[in-house]
Image (tube, rainbow, N blue to C red):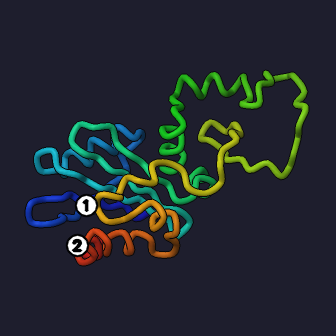
Amino acid sequence: MYFAALLARTEDGWEASDMELDEVETLSDLADLAREAALDDDTVVAFIEQEDAWFGVIRVDGEDDPRVFLSNAAAASRSSYGAMLIDELLGRDDDDADDLDSLNLDGTEDGEPETDNDPDDDTIEAVNGSENHATVGPLGDTALLTDLGVGEKELLALDGDALATIADSLGCTEVLEAVR
């Protein structure tokens, strides 16, 4: 089960709204939802959390490209929304998925034997079903909340109810809890 919310910064503080993910298929869709919640070109922070397995923070500042952080890429890869964000972070699109079906990331094409079948390799499984080598753990922009009071080290150390900790640092715990 997911929890998703938008926090829009205003002159009077932060305003929260819950976010419907039904129509979200890409990071662009998510950024559009965030921009709709913004007043003028103010900052909007979107939170996605899946039952303490992983959380994602997406920051949208006006028309700038969204900035994304995922707490645990391996756990997020097993989720449709997490996998979508991983694909965006790694620069994959639908055309890349077709290419990845015929070419493994280790450089071998389908039908060629792989020379290294190390079972200890950390891998994540992408939406298209191919295995892609990636770092297990955090992925993305660890500095996306630094100017808002959540430093890189603090963001990387979060676990448990991370979104409440972030909201506390932003000064909007009550606003976030109202939509939770």
Provide residue 113's location: percent of width, then percent of height.
90, 27
The residue wearing badge 2 is 175
Around disc 2, counting alpha carbons within 10 Å, would you say few (fewer than 14), some (14 to 19), or many (20 or more)?
some
* Image quadrant in which you'd find residue 12: bottom left
Query: Which quadrant holds the C terminus?
Result: bottom left
Q: How many marks?
A: 2
Q: Are marks 1 and 2 in contact (CB under 8 Å)?
A: yes
Query: What residue is shown at x 40% (from left), y 65% (from top)?
Result: 3
Query: What residue is shown at x 37% (from left), y 51% (from top)?
Result: 58
Of labels 1 and 2, earlier in sequence is 1
Find the residue positioned furthest to the left: 11
Figure check: 22 above or below 157: above
Query: Which label sits on residue 7?
Result: 1
Provide residue 76's location: percent of width, then percent of height.
56, 54
Amino acid under label 2? Val
Figure check: 82 above or below 108: below
CA gap, disc 1 and disc 2:
8 Å
Residue 1 in the figure: left or right of residue 20:
right
